[in-house]
Image (cartoon, rainbow, N blue to C red):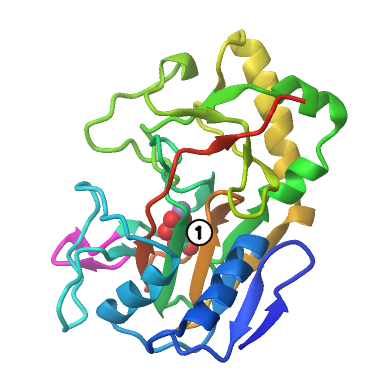
Amino acid sequence: MDIRPLGPAIGVEVSGIDAAKEIDAASRQRLRRAWSENGLLLLRGQKIDEAGLVRFSRNFGELELPPASAQRVYGDGGARQPEIWIISNVIVDGKPIGGLGYGEAEWHTDMSYIAAPPTASVLYAVEVPPEGGDTHFASMTKAYAALPEDLKRAIGGRTARHDSSYTSAGELRRGSKEITDPREAPGASHPIVRIHPETGVPALFLGRRRNGYIDGLALEESERLLDRLWAHCTDPRFAYGHKWRVGDVLVWDNRQVIHRRDAFDPNARRIMLRTQVKGEAPLAAKAA
Ligand code: OGA
Ligand code: MN
């Protein structure tokens, strides 16, 4: 196994691993450590079916089933695995075969609006458009470390609400009411600074900008602080943008990265298989 940085900010490319094969205990440990320490793993040139992706993903923990609202029309000809979600813009018989469409997806952490958000998300590229649809990742450990002292003090010991009503593509989730006042948004509250349970490193944990709210603050103050925090943490110096090739597997760590996706041509096809690893309640950092 060979491990090389993807760029100065975040992520490593791991070569010498065949995701379709059983991974021995020592290699699994190296893989997991690389994931915890770097936040993002890339494996290129993989050939796996749905069952293979489920098996590979289990190296990072027990899997979470997609929510009932997730679309599931696409079948690859083989057996369909209940753990697999489809991310795609392709429409068959008038129905999207998966979620997220072709538009931009804003910076977010996956499902941070639940009490125990997923640790890993795994995405496998089956079909990719000739251009666009890049996925960007930003390191929230680096962002926290570089935060000005006054901002660190302002968020120390505080929690923020993570709105569950909108997807990262800006769509209202099925069964959700439209929210205009962030203080009324449904969703879990989490520590704004969380400690990574395996590395002990603190990370900013904001979820997504839309309807974010810092508990206990006046709305205007919360908005002002969140605007500053988001302007800081989405700075390109903390980020890596991924141009997908068919056969790429990305595994990211939602405890320390945020991600977003570029839009692409609606007439191009993009099909990704996705799994998610069950998480735990975020560990709060001690107030500074
Ligand atoms: C996701 C996601 C981005 C992409 O699957 O959680 O944000 O590039 N996907 O499809
Ligand atoms: Mn996502």
Residue placed farthest to the right in the image? 149
Residue 285's x, y, as percent? Answer: 66, 33
In this view, 13 is above or below 165? below
Quadrant position of residue 236:
bottom right
Q: Residue at x 75, y 41 (%)?
A: 144
According to the image, label 1 marks what residue? 263
Residue 56's x, y, as percent? Answer: 38, 76
Under circle 1, the secondary element is loop
Q: Residue at x 54, y 74 (%)?
A: 29
Residue 28's x, y, as percent? Answer: 50, 77
The verdict on label 1 being within 8 Å of ligand 1 is: no
In this view, 182 is above or below 32? above
> Magenta segment range?
89-98
Q: Residues within 10 Å of mark 1 (few under 14, many from 20)?
A: some
Residue 96 can be seen, yes or no: yes
Along the line of sight, the residue nearer the viewer: 16 or 130: 16
Residue 133 can be seen, yes or no: no
